Image (spheres, rainbow, N blue to C red):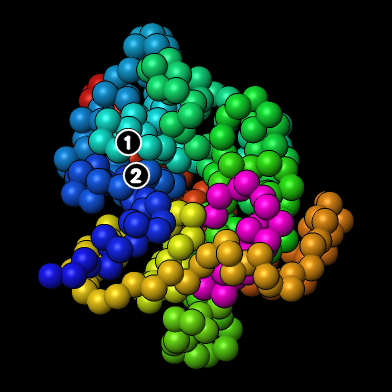
Amino acid sequence: MGKNLLEQLREITVVVADTGDLEAIEVFRPQDATTNPSLITAAAQMPQYQGIVDDTLKGARETLGKDATAAQVVSLAFDRLAVSFGLKILEIIPGRVSTEVDARLSFDTEATVVKGRELIAQYEAQNVSRERVLIKIASTWEGIQAAAVLEKEGIHCNLTLLFGIHQAIACAENGITLISPFVGRILDWYKKDTGRDSYAPAEDPGVISVTDIYNYYKKFGYKTEVMGASFRNIGEIVELAGSDLLTIAPSLLAELQSTEGELKRKLDPANAANLPIEKITVDKATFDKLHTENRMATDKLAEGISGFTKALESLEEILAARLTSLEG
């Protein structure tokens, strides 16, 4: 029997699980795991994780004391819940977990820096080294600047909601540890914009975007890692085999595991070295200009922040309802 696609992929790319579901992480045993507000909100509603939610709420009540209002308890529990899941995930995986800063802070550099430090402090209070945590921040100009500050303090960052080369270059120039360029969401936008039903994997606009970013980084020797994210099908994953990392939802990990065939390496630093790529320096003016000119990146960044914000608001409601039922 030959190796399945997942086994072959693991030989050339670090495979990451894109989920807050601990059982799925147990099954696939990825190197790293990523979460986001939508994934944490989904996991918080699964009956098997009620204990994590309850313990986080009880811990917040204990910290604040019996005189604190329900709103204060929920606010603190909300701040701690992603870390509570992160700590559980780190018991299963050997590598790093990505934990996201509140999406509502995406355009506030200072507040993002403060929140990033707070998240790391929570992990370190539980004896988890900051080397095992990536602070996830949206790839706005303000977010990238916040990440640059955190990186200088030894707090590693994962810049998410990344849709354009201008965002990627700004991250690399600011010494960011890792970026998560989105593949599927780019495809979604192009399908809607063009009215096309589908794209062949090699012509998928999301695949092309991540390929261009990967080649740019390797051509110019940037250390920032490229982790393709947000996949719609395994064809996209196959086309990006060789990327530094790929973060993949459990359903697609299962599909890769059950699919036989030969997996060819598509992304390779040796190929990138010979490509005729022009170097661009991205300051704020260039970033803003390129972002405005890129309708897809403009739309999807705004939509992504809005979607994560809605998930956070849902999570606050879930926590408030659960606190009421715990405390009566």
The numbered mark, 1 or 2, whose residue comes first in the sequence reads 2
In the rendered image, residue 211 lying in the magenta stretch gets the answer: yes
Q: Which mark is residue 200?
A: none
Question: On the image, which quarter does residue 269 sit in?
Answer: bottom right
Mark 1 near mark 2, Cβ–Cβ under 8 Å? yes
Q: Which mark is residue 31?
A: 2
Q: Residues within 10 Å of mark 2 (few under 14, many from 20)?
A: some
Q: Position of residue 104 (x, y in %)?
A: 59, 43
The residue nearer to you, when weighing 206 against 297, is 206
Q: Residue at x 41, y 46 (%)?
A: 34
Q: Is residue 240 above or below residue 136?
A: below
The residue stretch that appears in magenta: 207-228
Q: Residue at x 26, y 24 (%)?
A: 55
Q: Residue furthest left?
A: 1
Q: Is residue 176 above or below residue 307?
A: above
Q: Position of residue 267 (x, y in %)?
A: 51, 67
**Residue of label 1:** 94
Question: On the image, which quarter does residue 292 sit in?
Answer: bottom right
